[in-house]
Structures are given as structure tokens and as C-alpha cells.
Image (tube, grey):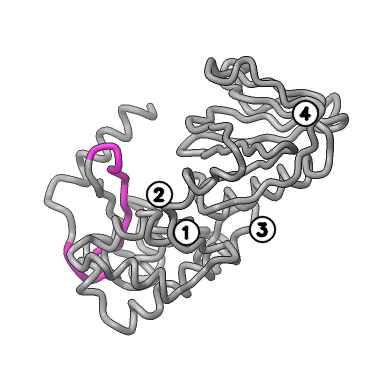
Amino acid sequence: MPEGDTVWQTAKRLHGALAGKVLTTSDFRVPKYATVDLTGRHVLNTVPRGKHLLTRVEGGLTLHTHLRMEGAWKVYGTGERWKGGPAHQIRVILGTADRAAVGYRLQVMRLLRTTEEESVVGHLGPDLLGPDWDPDLALAHLLADPARTLGEALLDQRNLAGIGNVYKSELCFLLGVTPWLPVGALPEDRAAKLPGLAQRLLEVNRDRPVRRTTGLRDQDLFVYGRAPRPCLRCHTRIRVADQGDGAQERPTYWCPTCQSGPAPAPGSPQRWRERYHRTTN
């Protein structure tokens, strides 16, 4: 699942493949940009901003993309087979003499003036993997709405940029509180610890092929995706339930023994499991 570390890795691959090179292929496969042709322009760089990617091209243009849940950028060499998905899922191809960067299932793609980048990323809070990272500002943002649940506050990219559903669940486990705890009820010592812990988790994972939060050789994550298996610490069964409203609703994992605080209404875990099986089986 794309989160801040995934986006950072993607930006690094795109930058390495395209930066400083002239585009020989420019193929936009969405109606809005079907006539756009960037061939002959140098690619300046690709930078991550939270979960957003900004690829800057000569002439003052920026291609802004967001991976959402299923998007991906793949980089291929000359003659290499493209394996990122069927051709109808390709949204854009940017190619040089020796590389092709192919964007699959990109639900967000905008071509804009580089001077207008703030219109798409200016709302973001401090970037956990960016040069603007400010733990004090991130914590102030999180605490600004004390009645809001911790899980929802962590996912709000206006508070801090880069945390997705995996890190939300893992952070709450490491802090020993449920994602349904109001932010204002978070003990002061744990609140002070939160920004640094979040930043360290993304920092240590930004170069790893497999995300890991446990430090264990045979288990990558403490709670995310592990229901109803036993907790790695206390052996209580991990639970899962929806958190959020409407389009923002996300499956959330926690250990009812290791994590203190409120839990979702009874029945939520079962509703999620039923929906999960309907959509994956």
C-alpha cells in the first residue's frame, strides 16, 4: 500500500531514470492531456511531497501524480518486458533513450506550471521525509482538534504528510493506545513521543523493499493485516474494524490488550471481514 516511504522510493527511481535526460517519448493516455507532447524537453527532477510526486520538466512544467491505493510508477530498460499491468491501465509514459517510466492506475494526474505547485501540495503539513519536517508543528496540528480520534488525525495529511493506513495502525500499537482514542486524551508523554516515532518509522523504511516496524526477522508488522492472528506481544487475537466516514473509511487493526482506550461499536469488525471477503474472493 503506497505511503510516504513508498512515494519516496518511487521518486528516487523516477529521478534516477529521467533527471537530466531528454524525453524521447511522451504518451499521455487520458483525454485531458491526449494532445500534450513533452518530447525534446529535459527532465529536471522528481521530488516527493508527502504522498504526492512532482516531476519537473524543462519549460516550467510539472507533472503531479498521486498513487492513491493502487497506482504505481514502473521504470523499464530498453527491451525489458513491461509487467506493471495490462496496457489499458497505463495512464502516461515518459521515455528517454534508455529508460521508460510508465504510470499505471494513476487516479490523480495533473500537468501544471511549476510555479503553481502549491495549488496541489500547499495544504500539506510537515513532510515526514522532507526537508520541511518540523515535529513541533506536526504535534501542534494533531492536537488542534482534541476531540478527533487519533487514527483519523494521523491520516489527515494537513497535520503531517506521509502516514497512511499501515503506519496509522502500527503507530497506535507502538504508542499503546487504540486509534479511537481522542487526540486530547493521549497522555502527554506519548504525545511528545509521537512525531519522532512516526518520522523514525518512515526513515528506516524508505530504502527497504519490504516495510517493517517490528524489528523481528520473521514478522514485518505488529498489527496491520494480521487479524485474527495472535498479537506478537500478548497473544490476544488482533482485531479489525472500519474507521472514518464514507470515502475516508479504512480498515484499522489493533490489539485490545496491548492498546488502551475506546474501541469501535460492536459489530464493526465482522462487517469489515464480510466486505473484505466479498471483494477479494
Q: Is residue 217 visible?
A: no
Query: Which is nearer the N-term, disc 4 or disc 3?
Result: 4
For residue 207, which numbered disc appears in the image?
3
Q: Residue furthest left?
A: 266
Which residue is at a point 49% across and 33% down the rendered structure image? 108
Query: Which is nearer the N-term, disc 1 or disc 4?
Result: 4
Specify the amino acid type for callout 4: Gly
Within 10 Å of disc 3 (Cα), the crowding (few <14, some 14-19, many 20+) is some
Q: Are marks 2 and 3 in contact (CB under 8 Å)?
A: no
* Residue 91 placement (x, y as % from top left): 59, 23
Q: Are marks 4 and 3 in contact (CB under 8 Å)?
A: no
Mark 1 lies on residue: 221
Specify the amino acid type for callout 1: Leu
Mark 4 lies on residue: 95
Within 10 Å of disc 2 (Cα), the crowding (few <14, some 14-19, many 20+) is some
For residue 225, which numbered disc appears in the image?
2
C-alpha span from label 4 to label 2: 36 Å
Query: Which is nearer the N-term, disc 3 or disc 1?
Result: 3
Q: Are marks 1 and 4 in contact (CB under 8 Å)?
A: no
Q: Which residues are magenta?
A: 246-262
C-alpha span from label 2 to label 3: 22 Å
Asked if residue 206 is positioned above or below residue 198 in the image, the reply reads above
Specify the amino acid type for callout 3: Asp
Query: Which is nearer the N-term, disc 4 or disc 2?
Result: 4
* Number of numbered discs: 4
C-alpha span from label 4 to label 3: 25 Å
Q: Are marks 1 and 2 in contact (CB under 8 Å)?
A: yes
C-alpha span from label 1 to label 4: 36 Å
Which residue is at a point 71% across and 42% down the rendered structure image? 14
- Judge from the rendering whether residue 37 lies leftward or rightward of residue 185; answer left or right: right
